[in-house]
Structures are given as structure tokens and as C-alpha cells.
């Protein structure tokens, strides 16, 4: 099994959007709980959210290229400024 990390940084002033999609975010994570090894937010010095790190276990690396995610994501508009993937 390959492990890869999704490293996400939030757009400026996106806390309201992040909070509005929070329950859908956790529901999505529960669906994929078997593949998610760990995850959590990056915090600012004052305790605010600045992004997140999620580590996934997959059978293949790199993940297959698709025109859309394999399952719908709960985020109609992303709060992410960037997303990068690192694998091993």
C-alpha cells in the first residue's frame, strides 16, 4: 500500500466557507475512513485555521487521473488556495 499526503492551504478570509461546509466535510471523511490514516488542520499562531493535512493509504501511486473525484466532494466552492500531494 502506498501512502500519500494532501497538503492544503486555505484562501485568505475563507473561515466562514470552511465552517459552512464542516459537517459535510466530516461526513465525506467518514465515508473514506478506511483509506484516511490521519488528518487535521494547520493552525495559525492565534489558533485560527490555515489549512489541513490528510494522509491517505492507497493501493496505487500516483492516484489515477480522473476528470472528477471518485465520489462527490461536499465543497461546491473550495476554501483552498492550494492543494499538493506527496507520496511514498
Image (cartoon, rainbow, N blue to C red):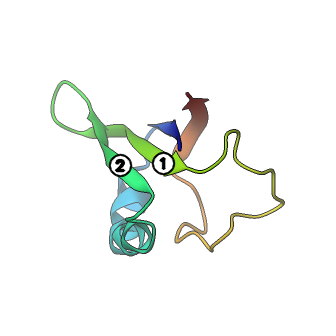
Query: Mark 1, residues whose alpha carbon is within 10 Å: few (<14), some, or many (≥20)?
Result: some
Q: Residue at x 38, y 75 (%)?
A: 27
Q: Nearer the viewer, residue 2 or 47?
A: 2
State the image quarter where residue 78 is shown: bottom right
Picture coordinates of residue 19, whole percent (x, y): 33, 62
Q: Which numbered dot is residue 37?
A: 2
Q: Nearer the viewer, residue 57 or 41?
A: 57
Picture coordinates of residue 31, whole percent (x, y): 43, 74
Secondary structure beneath dot 1 equals: strand
Query: Mark 2, residues whose alpha carbon is within 10 Å: few (<14), some, or many (≥20)?
Result: some
Mark 2 vs 1: CB contact within 8 A: yes
Q: Residue at x 23, y 39 (%)?
A: 48
Which residue of the protein is positioned furthest toward the top in this rendering? Answer: 45
Using residue 2 as the reference point, say whether residue 49 is left or right of it: left
From the viewer's perspective, is residue 21 above or below residue 44? below
Q: Residue at x 25, y 29 (%)?
A: 44
State the image quarter where residue 29 is shown: bottom left
Secondary structure beneath dot 2 equals: strand
Q: Nearer the viewer, residue 20 or 43?
A: 43
From the viewer's perspective, is residue 54 above or below residue 22? above
Residue ID for mark 1? 57
Q: Earlier in the sequence, mark 2 or mark 1?
A: 2
Using residue 20 as the reference point, say whether residue 76 is left or right of it: right
Amino acid at each position: 500500500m502506498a501512502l500519500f499526503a494532501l497538503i492544503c492551504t486555505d484562501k485568505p478570509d475563507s473561515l466562514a466557507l470552511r465552517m459552512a461546509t464542516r459537517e459535510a466535510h466530516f461526513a465525506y471523511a467518514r465515508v473514506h475512513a478506511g483509506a484516511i490514516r490521519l488528518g487535521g488542520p494547520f493552525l495559525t499562531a492565534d489558533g485560527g485555521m490555515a489549512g489541513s493535512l490528510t494522509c491517505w493509504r492507497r493501493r496505487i501511486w500516483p492516484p489515477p487521473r480522473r476528470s472528477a473525484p471518485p465520489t462527490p466532494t461536499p465543497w461546491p466552492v473550495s476554501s483552498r488556495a492550494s492543494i499538493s500531494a506527496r507520496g511514498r
